[in-house]
């Protein structure tokens, strides 16, 4: 395939410009900024469009805007080419929204656009794919050989060596696995690692996450604890309510106990009052004796006694009292002796003496009792038995005394001594009762005072009545229960207050929701960074893996072609190119076939190696007739190499169309010197 | 005689908002807004002297709510007195031993159904029974059995759970059973979007404020009037903000500015200065969208109350074409190396794209 004409109707700085090309060597001459790059861009755009070849959607490369005419509304052109004996015109309108590509066979004017495969991503045909049998990427990297921009500090040899694989494989020196790895490592450095907490983005994030997670866990623990405290508080409050109810019951029981005590006190007062009442009854009974004159009672009792004596004397008997006393005294004596005997024998352990003593003692006791049962005979002035045994003198004395006795009795309004004696007794009783009453009144007053009788009465009215079923408890027991109850309630209240305080303190904690929200934000960021890190690590590993893969057989055709080209370019000095397992490039020098590493050759020779490589790539790739475009590729060459290179190109141009761009007049001179007769296109 | 009440549910006081929902800064104010709306509805209930308020569960988000929340609600209910409040616990605030409902003493006008079986409260003066039961766990696998009712009084049912969801973990109720039982009103909670049913007399009140982007549409409460002959249910919109989710498709020619214009165009009839917006960006984007997303946010944020941009774009890289074109070259081999690795899918994608980006970096793209 060869290009015959370019029509740049509206492209870049060109407007309605056209150029014709010859089949062989074409030289496009123009100073800097003349439009050489624009022409190259035009060719690229016409055959492939300005679409990003790497994307799934139709995106435009920066070249689209770079070549868009500023002052024209059109953006189009056409290319005439020949292939397989036919001539065609490829036309393209680049305007977005109005894009079109068409191919017309010039011999019959037939449009053959549809014969080209449609590209779904670009939504148009890509004529270059079919015409050159290569993609736009390949086209750029194989069809164009550009000037290398060698900076003084560049290690050109290394660069060529390092990029050799890329150049050889991708046909592009832009793809550098080593550079890609470096780039990714820089990115990885920025992302950092989880362990570098102070210096890396991921590390800081992980540290912050960790702190927040700890805070979250702490808050969860705190919340759980708070809930437990609420449960405890509730239980304690419930317990206290029960204790309150029980306490109310105890208070009632306390009242009961109080009542018991008060009732006891009251009953003591009541008892005294009862005694007083009884005395008052007695008093009422004997009050009648108040006016009884008992001043002569002694005399009367004396008279009675004398009368009794007289009576007894007259009987020839001792007073009953003396007899009784005799009878009383006599049994007592042997009783006492018997007792002493018993004790003596008891302590001396003589059993017979014990029995004797005991018998005597018991006998005397019995006798004593019999004597006491015997009644003393009363002496009554009217006793007939006494009256009959009195002597006359005694009788007269007796009667005189009796009369006096009767007179006293009558004076006291008593018909009988008995009555008089009764009145005496009654009066004595009255005195006694009044004395007792006075005493009891005093006692009652003291008791009333001591027991605070008024209050006691009030309290007894106030205090609840004790129900029959109440189990009597001591006030001490109840008081003890009350004390325990109060103590327990107080302890519970203290604990409740403490729990309230602890719960309130938890309210100052940060809200769990806020912490979890912050955590969510950080986790998202961390996840993104983790993914990025993993991706970078995997990418680096992948790249290092492919960089380390050994090419068992590295395109022998390419190295053979390179060798031939290099040999021509160096006039046979370097006849062969060898690529080692470590991608070291070595050149075989001279007839001795000395193998020289590329690092040891001159920069100019390396340039030639590079040129040979690019030329070999071009000759081996794509369609056999693909044109070759060169953009000032020999600007760094010395004259000798320049000449050889041009000669090589001249030979090359016999087989393929060559389009050579230059801004150097001396290059044109060289071409004329070499009789290359280039088809000159002046921009 | 007319009985009028407000039916609310799913207020979720104290709720935590995940990052896909709200921006972190607005989460706290959203909790306050939920509070505010709830208080406003309760205030209205008192002003309009409704007979009572029904709350069908999930009043609190008990994992997150605070004692202050509980005290605040208790005080607010007390201020509504004498208007009674009848409520049940839901799956987000179950009534177990450690339930938040036990943290405060509820005022006398509040009745919390505390049984896990349906229990009845009789309002004799209104000739009305209110049936309700509370959750005591976070899940209830058993389908719900309704209490038997008689028709001599009116009957309301207060329930929190799913409807017609066989196998549900959330106390599933059958609408057919509800049709058979003929309650005068079934006050439901659990579903956050309001819905009035036609096949039986009842409704999901929905949450008074939407709680995430899945809860689009209006939110509020149900204003219900029961007369001797009929039950009228009116949905009252009350929420202060909405959640709006939009999708934007990126075109190949789009830049950050054109994307921003697209978003503005889609939201011009909405309320970006008031509501929560989540814009999902889909399509192919050249390079990493992360930077573009930040720029987009910076451009649009001043015009929006709350804006989240969700990146669902894919890197615009034709891996298949690259593999085809580069074959055995470094790029082709790299693609095959990564694709044949046993990396996780997301890591594989990330590795593929960052590696290719790095390899293509020097090229004229």
Image (cartoon, rainbow, N blue to C red):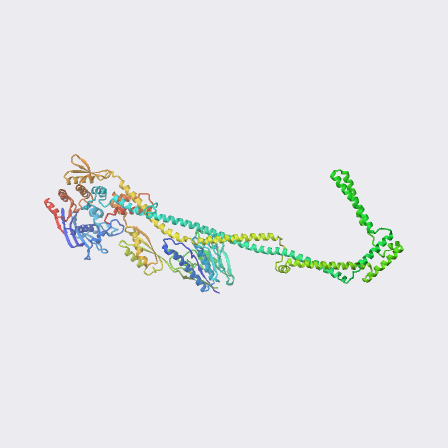
* Residue A296 pos. (x, y %): 80, 60
* Residue A163 pos. (x, y %): 23, 43
Q: Does any portion of residue B43 appear in the rendered image?
A: yes
Front residue (pair A429, A27) = A429
Q: Does any portion of residue B144 appear in the rendered image?
A: no
Q: Is residue A311 left or right of residue A621?
A: right
Q: Quadrant of residue A508?
A: bottom left
> B121 above or below A197?
below
* Residue A450 pos. (x, y %): 64, 57
Q: Quadrant of residue B207?
A: bottom left
User: Residue at 77% of width from left, 39% of height from top?
Assistant: A353
Q: Is residue B331 left or right of residue A314?
A: left
Q: Is residue A262 left or right of residue A285?
A: left
* Residue A463 pos. (x, y %): 61, 58
Q: Residue furthest right?
A: A392
> A500 above or below A334?
below
Front residue (pair A196, A314) = A314
């Amino acid at each position: 395939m060869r290009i015959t004409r370019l029509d740049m109707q509206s492209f870049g700085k060109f407007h309605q410009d056209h150029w014709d090309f010859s089949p062989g060597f074409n030289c496009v001459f123009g100073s800097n900024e003349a439009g050489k790059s624009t022409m190259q861009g035009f060719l690229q755009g016409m055959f492939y469009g300005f679409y990003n070849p790497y994307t799934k959607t139709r995106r435009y490369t920066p070249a689209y805007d770079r070549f868009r005419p500023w002052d024209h509304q059109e953006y189009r052109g056409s290319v005439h080419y020949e292939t397989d004996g036919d001539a065609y015109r490829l036309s393209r309108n680049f305007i977005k929204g109005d894009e079109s590509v068409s191919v017309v066979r010039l011999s019959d004017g037939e449009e053959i656009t549809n014969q080209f495969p449609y590209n779904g991503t670009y939504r148009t045909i890509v004529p270059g794919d079919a015409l050159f049998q290569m993609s736009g990427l390949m086209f750029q990297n194989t069809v164009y050989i550009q000037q290398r921009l060698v900076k003084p500090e560049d290690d050109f040899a290394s660069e060529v060596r390092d990029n050799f694989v890329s150049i050889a494989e991708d046909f592009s020196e832009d793809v550098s696995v080593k550079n890609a790895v470096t780039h990714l490592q820089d990115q990885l450095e920025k992302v950092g690692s989880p362990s570098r907490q102070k210096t890396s983005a991921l590390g800081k994030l992980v540290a912050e996450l960790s702190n927040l997670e700890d805070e979250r866990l702490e808050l969860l623990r705190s919340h759980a604890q708070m809930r437990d405290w609420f449960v405890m508080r509730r239980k304690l409050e419930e317990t206290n309510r029960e204790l309150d109810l029980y306490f109310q019951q105890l208070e009632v029981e306390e009242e009961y106990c109080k009542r018991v005590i008060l009732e006891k006190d009251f009953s003591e007062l009541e008892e005294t009052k009862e005694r007083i009442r009884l005395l008052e009854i007695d008093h009422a009974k004997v009050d009648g004796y108040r006016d009884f004159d008992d001043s002569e009672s002694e005399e009367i009792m004396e008279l009675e006694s004398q009368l009794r004596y007289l009576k007894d004397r007259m009987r020839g008997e001792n007073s009953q009292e003396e007899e009784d006393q005799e009878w009383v005294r006599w049994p007592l004596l042997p009783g006492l002796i018997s007792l002493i005997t018993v004790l003596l024998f008891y302590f001396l352990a003589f059993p017979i003496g014990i029995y004797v003593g005991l018998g005597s003692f018991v006998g005397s006791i019995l006798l004593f009792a019999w004597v006491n049962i015997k009644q003393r005979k009363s002496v009554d002035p009217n006793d007939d038995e006494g009256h009959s045994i009195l002597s006359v003198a005694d009788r007269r004395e007796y009667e005189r005394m009796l009369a006096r006795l009767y007179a006293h009795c009558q004076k006291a309004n008593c018909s009988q001594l008995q009555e008089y004696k009764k009145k005496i007794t009654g009066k004595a009783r009255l005195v006694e009762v009044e004395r007792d009453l006075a005493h009891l009144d005093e006692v009652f007053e003291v008791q009333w005072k001591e027991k605070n009788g008024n209050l006691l009465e009030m309290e007894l009215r106030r205090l609840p009545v004790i129900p029959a079923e109440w189990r009597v408890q001591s006030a001490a027991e109840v008081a003890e229960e009350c004390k325990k109850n109060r103590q327990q309630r107080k302890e519970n209240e203290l604990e409740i207050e403490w729990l309230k305080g602890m719960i309130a303190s938890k309210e100052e904690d940060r809200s769990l929701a806020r912490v979890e929200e912050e955590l969510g934000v950080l986790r998202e960021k961390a996840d993104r960074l983790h993914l990025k890190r993993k991706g970078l690590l995997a990418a680096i590993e992948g790249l290092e893996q492919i960089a380390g893969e050994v090419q068992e057989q590295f395109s022998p055709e390419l190295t053979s072609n390179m060798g031939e080209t290099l040999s021509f370019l160096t006039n046979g000095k370097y006849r062969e190119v060898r690529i080692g397992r470590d991608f070291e490039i070595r050149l075989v020098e001279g007839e001795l076939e000395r193998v020289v590493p590329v690092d040891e050759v001159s920069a100019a020779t390396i340039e030639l190696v590079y040129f040979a490589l690019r030329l070999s790539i071009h000759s081996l790739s794509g369609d056999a007739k693909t044109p070759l475009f060169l953009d000032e590729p020999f600007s760094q060459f010395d004259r000798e190499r320049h000449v050889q290179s041009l000669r090589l190109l001249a030979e090359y141009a016999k087989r393929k169309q060559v389009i050579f761009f230059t801004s150097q007049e001396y290059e044109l001179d060289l071409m004329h010197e070499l009789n290359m007769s280039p088809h000159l296109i002046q921009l | 005689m007319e009985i009028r009440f407000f039916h609310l549910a799913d207020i979720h006081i104290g709720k935590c908002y995940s990052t896909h929902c709200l921006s972190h800064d607005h989460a706290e104010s959203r909790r306050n807004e939920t509070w505010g709306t709830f208080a406003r509805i309760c205030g209205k209930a008192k002003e309009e002297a409704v007979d009572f308020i029904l709350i069908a569960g999930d009043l609190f988000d008990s994992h997150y709510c605070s004692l202050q929340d509980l005290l605040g609600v208790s005080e607010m209910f007390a201020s509504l007195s004498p208007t009674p409040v009848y409520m049940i616990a839901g799956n987000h605030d179950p009534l177990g031993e450690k339930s938040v409902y036990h943290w405060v003493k509820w005022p006398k006008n509040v009745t919390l159904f505390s049984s896990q079986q349906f229990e009845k409260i009789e309002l004799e003066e209104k000739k009305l029974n209110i049936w309700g039961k509370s959750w005591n766990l976070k899940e209830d696998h058993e389908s719900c059995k309704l209490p038997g009712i008689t028709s001599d009084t009116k009957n309301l049912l207060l329930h929190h759970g799913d409807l017609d969801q066989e196998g549900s973990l959330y106390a599933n109720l059958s609408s057919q059973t509800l049709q058979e039982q003929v309650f005068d009103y079934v006050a439901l909670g659990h579903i956050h979007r309001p819905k009035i049913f036609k096949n039986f007399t009842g409704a999901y009140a929905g949450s008074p404020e939407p709680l995430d982007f899945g809860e689009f549409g209006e939110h509020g409460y149900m204003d219900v009037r029961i007369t001797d002959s009929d039950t009228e249910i009116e949905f009252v919109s009350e929420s202060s903000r909405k959640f709006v989710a939009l999708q934007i498709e990126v075109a190949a020619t789009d830049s950050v500015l054109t994307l921003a214009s697209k978003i503005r165009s889609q939201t011009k009839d909405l309320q970006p200065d008031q509501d929560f917006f989540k814009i999902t960006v889909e399509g192919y984007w050249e390079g990493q969208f992360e930077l573009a997303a930040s720029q987009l946010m910076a451009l649009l944020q001043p015009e929006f109350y709350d804006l989240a941009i969700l990146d669902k774009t894919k890197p615009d890289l034709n891996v298949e074409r690259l593999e085809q074109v580069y074959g055995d070259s470094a790029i082709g081999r790299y693609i095959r190396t990564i694709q044949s690795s046993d990396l996780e899918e997301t890591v594989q994608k990330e590795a593929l794209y960052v590696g290719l980006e790095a390899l293509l970096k020097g090229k004229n793209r």
